[in-house]
Image: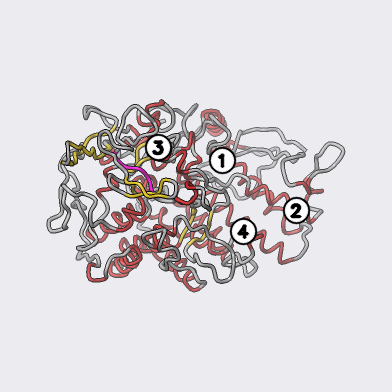
C-alpha cells in the first residue's frame, strides 16, 4: 500500500515497507502489508505503533554541526562556529528563509532537522493507530489500553513541539481519507491547539494501565503518566502566555489549575527534586551531579527528578563542546555574560544586577549593579550561586585534564584564551560545564549526561509562574525558594516580593538560571513577548575579557560579534518567535485553502 502524497506533511501518506519498522514487519514477497493485515496481527500492531517513536528529537548537541541552536539563538550563549560560517551564525546575520533554514534543512542527516515534516508524519502514524486500535489484534487488553494511552502522550508531545516552533496549527485527530477536501483545513488558535495537547495528556493520565514510572529497564523507552503530567504542565503554561494567548482571555487560572494538579500528582507518585549528593568527591553540589546522573528504571531510583530521559547516549562533550587544554575539536556554544550576570550572590541571596533594568545601555556594557549584593567586579566569580559553578567554566576554574586538575586560563596567552578566529576557543570568556562528565574525558568511566526532556524542577517553576500570574504570589515564591534551597541558598536569604511585578521578575530570573542550556530560555523570552514585538534586550551579546599584565589581572566587558554599531544577533527580531513553514507546504496549503499560512516575517 502506498498512498499518493498530497501534502508533504499534514496530508502525508503512510507507506509500510520493508525496513520501515521492526523486523517483525518483514514479509514476503514484496514487504508490503495493508492496514487491515497490520492490525489483524498483534505483533504487527505493536510494531506499527513503534514507528510513532521514530521522530522523537534528541536535542542538546544534536542540532546542525553539534550546536544547540535554541540556546545559541537566545541570550544565554554564543556559537563559536561563527568563524567557520556554519551553524547559528546564519541566524545571527538574519539569514534563513522558508526554503532553507537551520532547523528545517537537513544539511546532514545525523543532526536534528525537518521538524515540520517529521512531526506531522508521526502525528499521522498516531492518528491511524488510534483509529484502528479499538478493534486491532493485541496480546492483551492491557496492551491495548496502555498503547492507546501512550499514543495520546506522543501526539500531545509532537503537537506541543510543533506549536512551540511554528505557532497555531490545524487540529487533526483522524487521518485524512484519500478523497479528502483539503480546502476546508484551517488553523485553530494557538490556545485551542495547546488545550488539545492538555486534553490528550489528561486522557492518558486516566489510564490505569499506564504506569507513573518505568520500573523495568527493558521498557525504558516507553511512556508514563508522569510524562503526560509534565507535558500538560508546559502546555497549559504556554496557553496563558502572551505570545500564544492572543484572544484577550485571561487563562492564568486555567494554567494554575492544570499545573497544580500535575505537580500534586507527580509528588504523590514519588517525583521530587534531586537533593542528595552521591558523588561529593566528583561534583560540588547536587545540581551539578544531577545533570551527569542518568536516570534508570526501578521502583526506588536514585534520581526521582527526571520524568523523561532521552534514550540517546551523550558522548564527547570534551570534543565538540570542549576546551583547548583538552585537545578539543570545537568549543561549541559558550555561556554569555548575560547568563553569567544572572547568577546571584550566595551569601546575600541578592541578584548581581537590577532585575527590572539590568543594564544602563543597549549594548549591555554598563551593568546596573544591585546595591548591597556583595558582588565585586574585580573578583567577578567569587561567592556566586552554586549553579554558576555547575554550569560555567570561567577564568580560574579548576577542571580535570586526564587524571589531574588544571586551572583554566582565559586571559591573553592563557591555555584556553579568548580568540575570535578559532572554533576551539571561547568567544565570550567562558565554556560550558553543565552535563559534563570529566571521567568520560579522562577515560576512566561513564558518559556525559543525557538530555532530560522533562524534570520535576520544571514543574515546580511552571507552577510557580502560573501561581504568581494567577495572584497566588506566596505560593509561587515558596516554590522558587524550594528550587533555590536545592541549589544551596540558605532559607535566611529567601526571595520575597510585595507586588506581582516583583514576583514575576524573580520567577523569570530563576528560570533563566535554573534552566540554563535546557532549551527553555529561547522559548521563555519569546512566549513572554507579543507576536510582532522584537526582543530588544537580546540584540547584543557580551562577554568578559580577562587581561593579564604581570601579576595583575583585570576584567573588561565587550560586545561579541559586533563593534556595537549593529546587533550581535538578528535573531532578536520578531520573525524568529516562530520558524517558517517550509515553502513547498505553505504554497500547497495557501493554494488549496486560500488562506495565509506562513508565519509573521517569513
Residue behind mark 3 = 331
Foreground: disc 3 or disc 4: 3
Residue at 31 percent across and 53 percent down: it is 388
Label 4 and label 2: CA atoms lie apart by: 20 Å
Q: Secondary structure at mark 1?
A: loop
Left or right of 27, for residue 593: left
Label 2 and label 1: CA atoms lie apart by: 29 Å
- How dense is the environment of label 2, judged by Cα within 10 Å: few (below 14), some, or many (20 and up)? many
Residue behind mark 2 = 45
- Residue 185 badge: 1
- How dense is the environment of label 3, judged by Cα within 10 Å: few (below 14), some, or many (20 and up)? many
| Region in magenta | 429-433
Q: Is residue 75 above or below residue 105?
A: below
Left or right of 275, for residue 369: left
Q: Secondary structure at mark 3?
A: loop
Label 4 and label 1: CA atoms lie apart by: 37 Å
- Residue 220 badge: 4
Q: Position of residue 56 (x, y in %)?
A: 57, 47
Amino acid at each position: 500500500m502506498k498512498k499518493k502524497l498530497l501534502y508533504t506533511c499534514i496530508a502525508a501518506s503512510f507507506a509500510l515497507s520493508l525496513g520501515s519498522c521492526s523486523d517483525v514487519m518483514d514479509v514476503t514477497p514484496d514487504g508490503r502489508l495493508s492496514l487491515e493485515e497490520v492490525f489483524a496481527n498483534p505483533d504487527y500492531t505493536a510494531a506499527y505503533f513503534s514507528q510513532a517513536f521514530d521522530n522523537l528529537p534528541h536535542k542538546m548537541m544534536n542540532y546542525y554541526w553539534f550546536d544547540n541552536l535554541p540556546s545559541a539563538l537566545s541570550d544565554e550563549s554564543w556559537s563559536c562556529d561563527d568563524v567557520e560560517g556554519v551553524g547559528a551564525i546564519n541566524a545571527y546575520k538574519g539569514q534563513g528563509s522558508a526554503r532553507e533554514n537551520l532547523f528545517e534543512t537537513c544539511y546532514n542527516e545525523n543532526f536534528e532537522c525537518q521538524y515540520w515534516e517529521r512531526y506531522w508524519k508521526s502525528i499521522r502514524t498516531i492518528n491511524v493507530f488510534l483509529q484502528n486500535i479499538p478493534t486491532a489484534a493485541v496480546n492483551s487488553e492491557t496492551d491495548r489500553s496502555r498503547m492507546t494511552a501512550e499514543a495520546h502522550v506522543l501526539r500531545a508531545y509532537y503537537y506541543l513541539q510543533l506549536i512551540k516552533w511554528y505557532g497555531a496549527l490545524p487540529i487533526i485527530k483522524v487521518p485524512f481519507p484519500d478523497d479528502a477536501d483539503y480546502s476546508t483545513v484551517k488553523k485553530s488558535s494557538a490556545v485551542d491547539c495547546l488545550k488539545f495537547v492538555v486534553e490528550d495528556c489528561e486522557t492518558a493520565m486516566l489510564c490505569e494501565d499506564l504506569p507513573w514510572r518505568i520500573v523495568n529497564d527493558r521498557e525504558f523507552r516507553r511512556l508514563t503518566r508522569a510524562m503526560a503530567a509534565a507535558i500538560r504542565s508546559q502546555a497549559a503554561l504556554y496557553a496563558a502566555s502572551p505570545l500564544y494567548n492572543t484572544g484577550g482571555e485571561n487563562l492564568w487560572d486555567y494554567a494554575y489549575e492544570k499545573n497544580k494538579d500535575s505537580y500534586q500528582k507527580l509528588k504523590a507518585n514519588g517525583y521530587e527534586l534531586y537533593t542528595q549528593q552521591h558523588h561529593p568527591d566528583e561534583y560540588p553540589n547536587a545540581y551539578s551531579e544531577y545533570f551527569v546522573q542518568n536516570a534508570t528504571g526501578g521502583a526506588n531510583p536514585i534520581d526521582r527528578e527526571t520524568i523523561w530521559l532521552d534514550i540517546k547516549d551523550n558522548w564527547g562533550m570534551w570534543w565538540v563542546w570542549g576546551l583547548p587544554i583538552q585537545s578539543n575539536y570545537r568549543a561549541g556554544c559558550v555561556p554569555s555574560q548575560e547568563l553569567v550576570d544572572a547568577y546571584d550572590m550566595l551569601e546575600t541571596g541578592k541578584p548581581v544586577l537590577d532585575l527590572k533594568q539590568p543594564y544602563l545601555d543597549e549594548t549591555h556594557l554598563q551593568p546596573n549593579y544591585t546595591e548591597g549584593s556583595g558582588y565585586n567586579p574585580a573578583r567577578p566569580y567569587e561567592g556566586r550561586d552554586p549553579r554558576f559553578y555547575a554550569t560555567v567554566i570561567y577564568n580560574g576554574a579548576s577542571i580535570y585534564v586526564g587524571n589531574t586538575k588544571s586551572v583554566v586560563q582565559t586571559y591573553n596567552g592563557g591555555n584556553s584564551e579568548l580568540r575570535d578566529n578559532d572554533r576551539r576557543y571561547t568567544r565570550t570568556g567562558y565554556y560550558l560545564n553543565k552535563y559534563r562528565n570529566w571521567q568520560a574525558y579522562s577515560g576512566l568511566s561513564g558518559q556525559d549526561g543525557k538530555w532530560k526532556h522533562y524534570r520535576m524542577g520544571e514543574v515546580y517553576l511552571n507552577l510557580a509562574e502560573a501561581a504568581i500570574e494567577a495572584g497566588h504570589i506566596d505560593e509561587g515564591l515558596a516554590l522558587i525558594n524550594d528550587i533555590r534551597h536545592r541549589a544551596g541558598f540558605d532559607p535566611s536569604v529567601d526571595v520575597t516580593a510585595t507586588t506581582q511585578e516583583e514576583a514575576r521578575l524573580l520567577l523569570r530570573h530563576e528560570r533563566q538560571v535554573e534552566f540554563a542550556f535546557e532549551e527553555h530560555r529561547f522559548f521563555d523570552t519569546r512566549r513572554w513577548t507579543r507576536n510582532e514585538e522584537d526582543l530588544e534586550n537580546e540584540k547584543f551579546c557580551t562577554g568578559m575579557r580577562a587581561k593579564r599584565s604581570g601579576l595583575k589581572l583585570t576584567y573588561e566587558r565587550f560586545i561579541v560579534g559586533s563593534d556595537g554599531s549593529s546587533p550581535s544577533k538578528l535573531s532578536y527580531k520578531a520573525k524568529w518567535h516562530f520558524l517558517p513553514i517550509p515553502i513547498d507546504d505553505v504554497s500547497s496549503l495557501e493554494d488549496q485553502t486560500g488562506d495565509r499560512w506562513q508565519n509573521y516575517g517569513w
